[in-house]
Amino acid sequence: MNKTALITGATSGIGKATALMLAKHNYNLIITGRRLQRLQNFEKELKAKYQIEVLILNFDIRNREETKKQIETLPKNFQNIDLLINNAGLASGLDLIHEADIDDWEKMIDTNVKGLLYISRAIMPKMVERKSGHIVNISSIAGKETYLKGNVYCATKHAVESITKAMRIDMLPYGIKVTSVSPGAVNTEFSLVRLGDKEKADKVYEGLTPLYAQDIAEAVEFAVTRPPHVNINDILIMPAAQANSSYTHRM
Ligand code: NDP
Ligand code: 8X3
């Protein structure tokens, strides 16, 4: 029988590439995000290419009640989630901490921290009941280091790191694996969302070869294809042209 994976934020970037990778491994997929048209197009693409079942969940992960309801009302054949990829997230703004827009802070904290917690809280009890499951949290180099103007985004990813460690401890007796994957600069819609401007977003990747979503999907692939006795705790993956969050080598 196929396993089931739920990927938050599968409309773009890392989430979409990870969903495609999991489809190749014959997972039935629950794909989530706010942009319904994208989810519908992606569902068509997945079903055309792979012999898997696909379920769309179209909701905003910041909405606590909606998130709970979506998981509580899953159709029977999608209720046993084997793999949760906590990917939905964003940076909003790049400003000094005394100048930043507080709405940006709310957005990042509500999505990257609270949203991740809401969906995990809804899914984990069934994993515990079944004594089986794997949770992969997409963190960031921003969860390991703090950089100029990164302030609250970095804080949210530091929180993801801490939540990951907490999950690993609390899930231990139930045989549930917990992995953190922390990328450096990946060329997705991330910078467009963060900076709100295509020209500024393109500059982030100018003069260097960044990571691509596929690279992160491959890191996730490694973590989810290990034998039962192996857990990959943490993967930190950077472009070869980026030493850490502050030093990049541009041509
Ligand atoms: P993208 O902007 O390409 O994708 C972000 C995804 O998150 C989209 O599918 C989006 O879906 C979803 N999402 C955002 N907000 C919400 C919300 N409120 N409710 C539901 N879904 C939401 O960026 P990436 O693929 O790069 O980002 C994926 C993850 O990787 C994020 O957690 C990010 O912090 C992390 N990351 C990214 C790096 C990078 O350099 N790109 C590096 C390190 C980590 P929709 O808009 O349809 O709701
Ligand atoms: C995204 C990577 O360095 O832009 O999490 O914060 S960075």
Image (cartoon, helix red, strand yellow):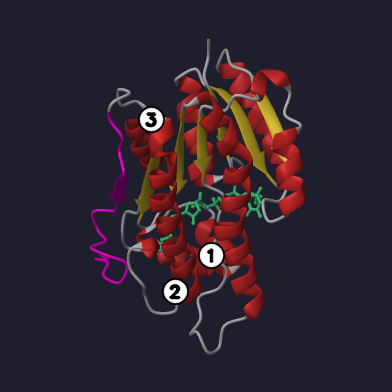
Which residue is at 44% across, 68% downward? 154
Residue 152 image position (x, y, % from top left): 50, 73
Q: Quadrant of the rendered structure where residue 219 is?
A: top left
Closer to us: 226 or 121: 121
* Residue at figure coordinates x 52%, y 21% from the top left: 27
Residue 220 placement, left or right of 33: left
* Majority SS type along the magenta span: loop
- Mark 2 sits near ligand 2, with its Cβ under 8 Å away: yes
Between the residue at mark 3 and the residue at mark 2, the CA separation in whole angstroms equals: 30 Å
Q: Which residue is mark 1?
A: 91
Find the distance from the CA under tag 1 to the CA under tag 2: 9 Å
Residue 57 place in picture, x, y as percent: 71, 36
Image location (x, y in percent) of residue 79: 65, 25
Residue 71 on the magenta segment:
no
Measured Cα–Cα span from mark 3 to mark 1: 26 Å
The mark found on residue 224 in the picture is 3
